[in-house]
């Protein structure tokens, strides 16, 4: 119903979802960073770790925080989203440098294109949010069309980024369906509350 879409996420549910996304970004990020089995931590490991913390942890928290409503949560949303984008940018730098040092081609998989589209796509909502929608100095902060585009584009890009994390793990673990399902489960649980 319309009323349920307008009401903010209750504090307990918000805290539980934040905990889920934070834990998944840290533990899932570390797990992916140390695959394949026995690989240990290496330069490449920073790629999945930073992408998970940036796109799942921080960007997920930003989306949930905005759903809490209000001035302070709107500002926190922007800060968390920008930090998430910077962390993901660090993850992009790592994988780019890693491929360069190994003499491998860039952007040869669906995973790489999805990740690039998600990260690159985040620039538009970030700029629009900062310039047009910022609650203090946004030049068109009441514009309903800008707000709607920002909201739904951000959610679509976040969904794309989350799918990229799963496809990235598949690259590292192969067809280990049990592991992929366990890895995807927190995202599936959080998605209806975060992305819808």
Image (cartoon, helix red, strand yellow):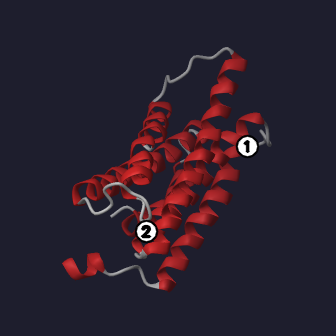
Q: Residue at x 63, y 55 (%)?
A: 28
Q: Is residue 39 left or right of residue 3?
A: right
In this rendered view, identify the residue nearer to me: 67 or 135: 135
Q: Is residue 187 left or right of residue 44?
A: left
Q: Is residue 128 visible?
A: yes
Give the residue pinned by disc 2: 66
The part of the image, by quadrant, that contains residue 1 is bottom left
Q: Residue at x 71, y 42 (%)?
A: 46
Q: Residue at x 39, y 70 (%)?
A: 193
As drawn, the residue found furthest toward the left would be 1
Q: Percent from the top left, x then y, of residue 77?
A: 49, 64
Circle 2 crowding by C-alpha within 10 Å: few under 14, some 14–19, many from 20: many
Give the residue pinned by disc 1: 37
Q: Percent from the top left, x then y, of residue 80?
A: 56, 60
**Mark 2 / mark 1, whichever is N-terminal:** 1
The secondary element bearing badge 2 is classed as helix
Circle 1 crowding by C-alpha within 10 Å: few under 14, some 14–19, many from 20: few
Classify the position of the C terminus by image quarter. Answer: bottom left
Q: Residue at x 25, y 59 (%)?
A: 143
Q: Is residue 66 left or right of residue 97?
A: left
């Amino acid at each position: 119903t319309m009323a349920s879409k307008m009401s903010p996420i209750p504090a307990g549910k918000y805290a539980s979802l934040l905990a889920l996304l934070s834990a998944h970004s840290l533990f899932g990020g570390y797990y992916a960073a140390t695959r394949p089995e026995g690989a240990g931590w290496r330069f490449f490991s920073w790629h999945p770790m930073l992408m998970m913390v940036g796109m799942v942890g921080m960007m997920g928290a930003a989306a949930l925080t905005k759903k809490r409503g209000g001035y302070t949560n709107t500002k926190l949303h922007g800060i968390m989203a920008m930090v998430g984008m910077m962390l993901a940018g660090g993850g992009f730098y790592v994988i780019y440098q890693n491929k360069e040092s190994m003499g491998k081609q860039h952007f040869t998989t669906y995973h790489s294109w999805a990740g690039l589209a998600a990260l690159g796509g985040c620039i538009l909502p970030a700029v629009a949010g900062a310039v047009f929608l910022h609650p203090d100095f946004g030049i068109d902060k009441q514009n309903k069309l800008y707000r709607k585009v920002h909201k739904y584009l951000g959610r679509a890009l976040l969904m794309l980024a989350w799918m990229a994390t799963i496809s990235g793990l598949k690259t590292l673990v192969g067809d280990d369906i049990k592991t992929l399902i366990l890895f995807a489960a927190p995202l599936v649980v959080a998605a209806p509350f975060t992305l819808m």
